[in-house]
Image (cartoon, helix red, strand yellow):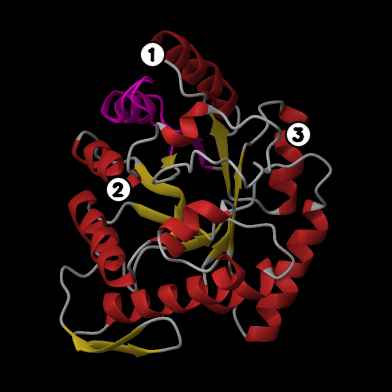
Amino acid sequence: MTPFSLSMFPTDYAIQPVELAQESEKRGFESLWFPEHTHIPASRKTPWPGGADLPKEYWHTHDPFVALGAAAAATKKLKLGTGVCLVIERDPITLAKEVASLDMISGGRVLFGIGAGWNVEEMANHGADAKRKWKIVREKILAMREIWTKEAAEFHGEFVNFDPIWSFPKPVQAGGPPVLLGSQSKRVFERAAEYCDGWLPINFPRYDFAGGVKQLRAAEKKTGRKGLSLSLFGSPSKEDAIKSFIDLGFERLIFPLPSEGREKILPMLDSYANVAAKYR
C-alpha cells in the first residue's frame, strides 16, 4: 500500500493546522507536511525558482514546529513532516531539541524533511553564508544526530563546534526521525546517501526522475548504504501518473494543497482521499 500524504503552507488566513490535521487523519492520509520561511526580505532581490511573482503564503506561514506541535496534540496516527525545514537558518542544538521534543510529544511520528533554501537575503539575515550552504547543512545534521543518539554529545567542525553537552529529550524513533533531503541539486544523491535517510524531490515538469532514482541507488552502493526512501512533493492525482511514480519506487506521494480556507480545502481532501483509496 502506497502512503498518500498532504502538504500546505499553514498561514494565518488559511484553514488552521489543528483542523487540517484532524480532517487529514479522518480521511486516512499518512502524513501532513508544513514548509518554513521565517520571513521574506522585502527587497525581493533573489528570484523565486517557481516563477515571477512569489506567492504571499511564503511570508504568512506559521512556524512549522509550532504548527506541527498543535497538529500532534490533536491527532493520534498522522505523521508530521517538515517540508522542508531550512536547517541553514537554525541553531543545530536548539533544532535538535525541537525535533526530539516533537517526536516525543507525538509518540514518534516525525518525518524530518530538510533543505538549504533558495533566498540568499533570507539566509543572510540569519547570518548564514549562501555560498557554503550545503557544507553548513551537512555539519548541522551530523551534529544533530550526535545530540539525538549520545548522552554526552560533542561535535567539532568548521561551522558547528561544541564540547560535550547533555540534551534531552531524545527522539522516540531510534537514531532520530528519518532525515529526508528535499533538493534536486547536482550533488543531492551523494548528500542523501552520506547523511540522510531518503530523497524528497518536488514533481517538476520534465525532471528525469527515473535517472534520479538510478543515481540515488548508485550513490547508496558507493557509500555502502541501502534502502533510502523516496517521497514526492506535488504528487499528481491522475492514476497513470501516480502509477509511473510508484513503478519508479516512490513510497510516499504527497498531494499539494493551496493556502485556503476550509470551504475550499475540505472538498480537495475528499477528492484526494478518493484517489488514494484506489491504492489501498
Q: Which residues are magenta?
A: 3-31
Q: Amino acid at mark 1?
A: Arg
Task: Name the residue at the front extreme.
Answer: 43
Q: Could you give the CA–CA distance between mark 2 and mark 3, rounded to whole angstroms?
A: 32 Å
Q: Position of residue 164 (x, y in %)?
A: 21, 90
Residue at image position (23%, 65%) is 97
Asked whether 21 falls inside the magenta stretch, the response is yes
Q: Which mark is residue 262?
A: 1
Assess disc 1: are there few (<14), some (14-19) or many (≥20) residues with their C-alpha within 10 Å of its C-alpha.
some
Residue at image position (44%, 45%) is 37
Is residue 204 or residue 40 the one in the foreground?
40
- In the image: residue 161, left or right of residue 249: left
Secondary structure of the residue carrying tag 1 is helix
Q: Position of residue 249 (x, y in %)?
A: 68, 54
Q: Could you give the CA–CA distance between mark 1 and mark 2, rounded to whole angstroms?
A: 22 Å
Mark closer to the chain start, 1 or 2: 2
Task: Name the residue at the top extreme.
Answer: 263
Residue 212 in which image quadrant: bottom right
**Which residue matches tag 3?**
241
**Which residue matches tag 2?**
65
